[in-house]
Image (spheres, rainbow, N blue to C red):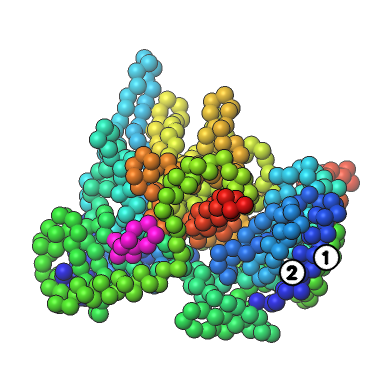
């Protein structure tokens, strides 16, 4: 383990900002969000989590895939849009968001298919994760992974706040190389650093109040697809895309052409299964015209279909959907109330 | 919070009577949610379940938005003064049948927005363990300590200078109206101050904010007077607004949405509350409301029968420069 003082950290950030694009949470007029920074002073410290996740850093909300031009002779010219090659750095991503990146990474970067726009961006993004010591009552990452707020999955470096600086653990090979090549900024951590981190982790874990019981949740959902619970529970839902857009594991997108005259660009842009027209087909049929079916689908996807396909629950317990929902839905409650509904009946 | 115990008991009794007598099939109201500062909309059909209904200072939703889902069912709906104005408008626009709606007006002394309060904020708001009104103070209890706020500082912005307490007719009322503010224009002051900014400064302001819009359409979906079965923004061939999210199209979308509310929007404030990016949308909705009041002497939602000026034609109208 290494240690970096606040002063050295500020110098490191300034150095990184000279050659790379550096992202960090910044507190603005209304909220804290991911912005490009030039100095460590801009980094927000007093907040639980950003409103949106780091997802746009490797999966932008809207992105032109290529340009095209329809020629008069019937041919089409295509023009690729290369990605920036300059590497990026994300400073103080939360462990939940970073873990999410790996979960959806499995969709965009698989054996048979590699979405280079997602995968290349992710490869060029160096992630410094800050372990959480002040979770919200709405956070439940501890239910989704045992290390919870100190999880290092997907990180290059893990920073833990200590006295006058940060305890630094290289996680990936890139993180290891980074610390070695910038050795001047880091010192060796004291002998008691590891037990200190363990203690801080235990303290953080003890603060969590929300829980989501993931035990056999995929089977519970699959068995109760037709349950009247979904009709009742979904009443308040207004079918906006808020939960989807703030979620770090949601990844559906729409593809459209934007053109004027004979030329334009094909772009992809985030889509949400909660929108009424998400499943609308040419011809007008919509298998999920009812709000209750869309509501059910969201939770089935995250807790049943996705786990069946890839052995991971598509939820990291960041709690954003719960905090952002305009009608105060709570995902842990939606699952626990389903259980209560189902077991209440079997007890009759 | 103000203790609404008495009012909650009255409401539950009324709801049970309405359901048992068959006067209504369902009651739409507020119920508790996960945290002290949150409630949730609920629909009750079984008179045995009326204890789910509550009234407190966190009943922020405009429940009239749920009425349109049940055009043929007799429905009672719990309403604040601001929400009742929306029902009047929906009745006027024939989106609801008068005989199918039972309005229950519950007077309140303001909705609290502790997330917007500097001393609390959005993160800490969820950590609240208890709150109690004590005269002009609001006493807050957290796990790690207590905090006293001035009641006025804790109010949601839209509830400061509330003018929705008087002259509203409902089928049933619970509680007593609070006193009206003495200055009838106080509620427009924040808009007038904003309009003092130069056009360039206002353009920069809106560009700054709308660069953060994510087009989740929460503002549109939560709006009770936004009820087109096929929304123009869902049209694909041709597109009216590109789904490529960028600042100019975000502004265009919002302008079109807000302009659908001219002479109709009662500034219930739900759009601003629902926005996950906290865009200051009431600067738009309130500005339009003020303009209509100033130019046409009309305030939407006061009753369910007076035709709005923008929907009427009178040959005696002054046609201005058109003679």
Q: Position of residue B191 (x, y in %)?
A: 63, 65
* Chain containing mark 1: B
Secondary element under disc 1, as helix, strand or loop, is strand
Queried whether the magenta region covers residue A62, the answer comes back as no
Which chain hosts label 2? B
Question: On the picture, is A158 further left or further right than B266?
Answer: left
Q: Which mark is residue A114?
A: none
Asked if marks 1 and 2 touch (Cβ < 8 Å), the reply is no
Task: Residue at 29% x, 74% y: name it.
Answer: A200
The residue stretch that appears in magenta? A142-151
Residue B8's disc number: 2
Q: Is residue A126 left or right of residue B93?
A: left
Residue A232's place in the image compared with B13, above or below, is above
Question: Which quadrant does the N terminus of chain A fall into?
Answer: bottom left
Q: Kindly indicate the quadrant of the structure image that contains residue B36.
A: bottom right
Q: Quadrant of residue A19?
A: bottom left
Residue A138 visible in the shown view:
yes
Question: Reading the chain from its start, which is encountered first: label 1 or label 2?
Answer: 2
Cα–Cα gap, marks 1 and 2 = 12 Å
Residue B19 lies, in percent from the top left, at 80, 54
| Residue B211 can be seen, yes or no | no
Position in image of residue A192 (x %, y %): 17, 78
Q: Is residue A143 magenta?
A: yes
Mark sitting on residue B173? 1
Q: Nearer the viewer, mark 1 or mark 2?
A: 2
Query: Considering only vertical position in the picture, is B4 above or below A107?
Result: below
Magenta stretch: helix, strand or loop mostly: helix
């Amino acid at each position: 383990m290494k240690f970096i003082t606040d002063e050295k950290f500020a110098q490191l950030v300034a150095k990184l900002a000279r050659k790379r694009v550096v992202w960090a949470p910044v507190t603005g007029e209304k909220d804290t969000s991911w912005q490009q920074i030039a100095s460590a002073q801009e980094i927000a410290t007093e907040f639980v989590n950003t409103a949106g996740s780091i997802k746009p850093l490797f999966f932008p909300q809207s992105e032109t895939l290529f340009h095209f031009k329809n020629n008069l002779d019937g041919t089409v010219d295509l023009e690729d849009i290369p990605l920036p090659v300059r590497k990026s750095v994300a400073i103080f991503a939360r462990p939940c968001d970073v873990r999410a990146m790996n979960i959806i990474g499995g969709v965009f970067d698989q054996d048979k298919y590699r979405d280079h726009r997602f995968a290349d961006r992710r490869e060029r993004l160096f992630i410094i994760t800050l372990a959480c010591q002040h979770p919200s009552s709405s956070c439940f990452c501890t239910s989704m992974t045992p290390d919870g707020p100190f999880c290092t999955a997907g990180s290059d470096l893990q920073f833990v706040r200590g006295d006058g600086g940060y305890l630094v653990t290289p996680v990936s090979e890139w993180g290891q190389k980074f610390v070695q090549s910038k050795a001047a900024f880091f010192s060796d951590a004291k002998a008691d650093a590891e037990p200190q981190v363990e203690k801080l982790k235990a303290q953080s874990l003890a603060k969590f109040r929300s829980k989501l019981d993931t035990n056999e949740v995929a089977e519970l959902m699959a068995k109760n697809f037709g349950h009247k619970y979904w009709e009742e529970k979904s009443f308040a839902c207004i079918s906006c895309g808020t939960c989807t857009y703030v979620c770090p594991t949601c990844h559906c997108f729409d593809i459209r052409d934007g053109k004027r005259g004979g030329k334009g660009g094909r772009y992809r842009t985030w889509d949400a299964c909660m929108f009424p027209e998400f499943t609308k087909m040419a011809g007008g049929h919509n298998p999920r015209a009812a709000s209750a079916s869309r509501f059910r689908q969201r939770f089935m996807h995250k807790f049943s279909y996705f786990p069946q396909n890839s052995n991971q629950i598509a939820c990291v317990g960041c709690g954003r959907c719960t905090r952002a929902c305009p009608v105060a839905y709570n995902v842990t409650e939606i699952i626990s109330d389903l259980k209560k509904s189902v077991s209440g009946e079997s007890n009759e | 919070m103000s203790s609404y115990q008495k009012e909650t008991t009255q409401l539950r009794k009324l709801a049970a009577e309405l359901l048992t007598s068959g006067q209504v099939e369902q009651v739409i109201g507020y119920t508790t949610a996960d945290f002290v500062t949150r409630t949730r909309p609920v629909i009750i059909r079984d008179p045995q379940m009326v204890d789910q209904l509550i009234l407190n200072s966190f009943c922020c939703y405009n429940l009239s938005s749920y009425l349109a889902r049940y055009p043929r069912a007799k429905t009672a709906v719990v309403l604040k003064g601001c929400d009742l104005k929306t029902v009047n408008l929906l009745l006027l626009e024939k989106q609801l049948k008068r005989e199918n709606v039972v309005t229950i007006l519950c007077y309140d002394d303001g909705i609290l927005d502790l997330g917007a309060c500097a001393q609390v904020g959005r993160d800490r708001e969820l950590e609240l363990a208890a709150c109690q009104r004590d005269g002009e103070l609001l006493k807050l209890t957290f796990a790690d300590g207590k905090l006293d706020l001035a009641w006025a500082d804790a109010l949601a912005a839209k509830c400061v200078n509330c003018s929705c307490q008087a002259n509203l007719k409902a089928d049933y009322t619970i509680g007593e109206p609070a006193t009206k503010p003495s200055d009838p224009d106080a509620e427009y002051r924040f808009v007038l101050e904003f309009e003092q900014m130069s056009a360039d400064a206002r353009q920069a302001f809106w560009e700054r904010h709308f660069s953060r819009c994510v087009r989740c359409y929460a503002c549109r979906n939560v709006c009770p007077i936004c009820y087109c079965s096929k929304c123009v923004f869902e049209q694909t061939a041709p597109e009216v607004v590109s789904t490529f999210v960028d600042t100019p199209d975000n502004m265009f979308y919002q302008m079109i949405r807000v302009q659908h509310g001219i002479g109709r929007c009662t500034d219930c404030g739900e759009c601003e509350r629902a926005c996950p990016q906290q865009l200051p949308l009431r600067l738009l909705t309130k500005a339009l409301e003020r303009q209509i009041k100033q130019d046409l002497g009309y305030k939407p939602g006061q009753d369910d029968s007076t035709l709005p000026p923008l929907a009427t034609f009178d040959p005696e109208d002054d046609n201005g420069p058109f003679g």
